[in-house]
Image: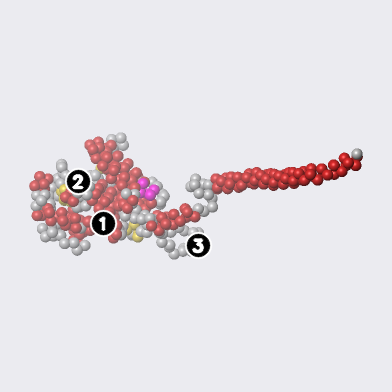
Amino acid sequence: MSGLVRSRLQAKGPRWYSWLVPICISLLVVCGIASVLMSQAASTDNASPRATSVVDNQSNAHKRGELHSGCPIVPCPELVVQLSEAQKSGPETVVPLPEAPKSGSEMVVPETQKSGREVNVGAVGTPQLVLPADVVNKVGHKIWINETRGDRNAITSWNANEEFASLGIGHFIWFPAGKTAPFYESFPRMLEFLRQQNARLPSWLDRTPIPPCPWVSRTDFIKNFNSPRMTQLRKFLLDTVAGQTQFLVMRAQSAIDKILDSTPESNEREHVITQFTRIVKASKDLYPLIDYVNFKGEGTDPAETALNKETGEREGWGLKQVLLKMNGTANEPMAVLAEFADAAQFVLLQRIRNIPANRIWEAGWLRRVETYRLPISDS
């Protein structure tokens, strides 16, 4: 019996084993796959914090290196390129010319680097004013705009309540015979200057001396506004803008000589020379000096003053008073031009306080001197 059972079990054994073995193999394969997947997941989890840490560190490093310019401490290539291009093409960029090295160990910054303009110095220590040919017409046009708002007909004018004609880009004063006023008669002098520059004056003007204004009053002037003489005069003035501008340059140069002649005190003289020199070096077009002298004069004529009721002193409003008001030492061009404009506004407001009737001109005067803050090409 036992033998029969044993033979049956032996006969059934192979059939049971035949399905158990594949199951075990399958389990082993599944376990192996699961193990591989788990190890990859663990590896990914460990790598992610490291990658995130690198990004954060780079971001923090950039923030630590940032200055207020928004660029890290290390040079920004993009910024360097932009600055370089601006220096090449910017209309107001000044490339300083090097001076010959001076003896001694101390490094001296060339004057052109400090100020942005080379100047020639005259005998009294003041710069000689020279307006480049390519700037002359721009300056003349700007002054013409100031005086006439660009109206071609207004280049010959006679303002209400005045006893003289105002002509040319600078509205140069021209008196009829027998009439004067406490103002500088500049039109005959301007014509003499143009004649010396070989300009051909209208025949009725081309005399020595220059004749007085042929129109005796504003009414007479308006009546003859389209007469042959007036039409010829307008054409002559429109054709000689560059020469008239050079006359204004000459007048600005002579203005500083008059100012120094009227300033005997040595400290004031030195102050005037210093401030005048700063402006000349800062302004490539000389427009602020040229226009203000034409606008309000040198400030040396006692007749062109007004009483300050608070101090009991008479105060002028010309270039001299503007230069005395300036006190800066910086040579950065924009800072110098801004200081000149501020001083001019102060002097004009002082005149309005002393002569309240002038308040009607306040807005226009202040608007005009505001144009001194920028070079003509930027305004």
Q: Is residue 35 visible?
A: no
Q: Name the residue at the top extreme.
A: 310
Question: Tag 3: residue type?
Answer: Gly
Res. 137 mark: 1
Report x, y in % for residue 120.
Answer: 35, 60
Cα separation between marks 3 and 2? 55 Å
| Residue at position x 38%, y 55% in the image | 90
Res. 182 mark: 2
Cα separation between marks 2 and 1? 30 Å
Res. 296 mark: none
**Residue at image mark 3:** 104
Cα separation between marks 3 and 1? 44 Å
Depth-wise, is mark 3 or mark 1 nearer the camera? 1
| Residue at position x 29%, y 39% in the image | 349
- Rendered image quadrant of residue 2: top right
Report x, y in % for residue 167.
Answer: 18, 51
- The one nearer the camera, 27 or 165, is 27
Which numbered disc flags the more N-terminal residue, 3 or 1? 3
Image quadrant where one finds the N terminus: top right
Report x, y in % for residue 146.
Answer: 25, 48
Callout 1: 10 Å neighbours few (<14), some, many (20+)? some
